[in-house]
Image: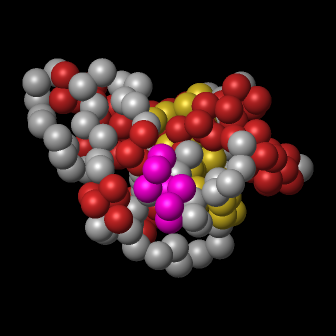
Amino acid sequence: MLIVIGGLPATGKTTLSRLLASRTNGVHLRVDTIEQAIVRSGLARHPVGPVGYVVGYALAEEHLRQGLTVIAESVNPLAVTRDAWRDAAVRAGAPVLEVEVVCSDPDEHRRRARSRSVDIPDLPLPDWVQIAGRDYEPWNRDRLVVDTAGQEPENSLAPLIDAVLTARA
């Protein structure tokens, strides 16, 4: 199964993806990790454009063909990127669950953006102005929306686990 987790920076995507990967024994594909590896190689500088996503789609499809659960985490801001994740699952013959992580409290979201620390060496984190002004297209199809505002990660994870179990049934 492919679980696509998207949303603006500082909403809790990485935290939820890591927890979900641990609970499902899934492969966590993080586009930030892929993009920073490309930058470290010397082949590109930030922003790297679509290359990190394209590598992610290929890795997701390969892991899905091996029968693994894949948690693909990225901002996933455009319909074209969302469609590409779904297409990878279809080509691999795997079901897909799409998840949008939001933080509905703007003050909390801003605090998170300002207080978070980088966990990938040399990865530049966007500031609040960049996050708030980011191009992020509205979703045009059903997805699970997980609102992390005012909750501990475990509480935000619960509806996600329920949706995964339902999708697998």
Whole-percent x, y for residue 62 in the image: 50, 33
Q: Which of 82 and 99 is in front in this view?
A: 99
> What's the magenta bit mostly, secondary-structure-wise?
helix
- Compared across the picture, whether 46 is left or right of 119 comes to left
Whole-percent x, y for residue 36 in the image: 27, 30
Magenta-span inclusion, residue 107: yes
- Compared across the picture, whether 63 is left or right of 129 comes to right
- Viewer can see residue 114: yes
- Compared across the picture, whether 18 is left or right of 131 comes to right
How many labels were placed on the picture?
0
Whole-percent x, y for residue 49 in the image: 21, 50
- Compared across the picture, whether 80 is left or right of 88 comes to left
- Viewer can see residue 97: no
Q: How is the image coloured?
A: secondary structure
The quarter of the displayed image where residue 64 is located: top right
Residue displayed at 35% across by 65% down: 132
Residue displayed at 78% across by 46% down: 155
The quarter of the displayed image where residue 108 is located: bottom right
Tell which residue pokes out farthest to the right in this image: 169
Which segment did they paint magenta? 106-112
Magenta-span inclusion, residue 67: no
User: Which quarter of the rendered picture does the N terminus lie within?
Assistant: top right
Q: Which of 150 and 17 is in front in this view?
A: 150
Residue displayed at 12% across by 36% down: 45
Whole-percent x, y for residue 66 in the image: 61, 28
Q: Nearer the viewer, residue 12 or 112?
A: 112
Residue displayed at 59% across by 75% down: 141
Name above or below for residue 123 compared with residue 82. above
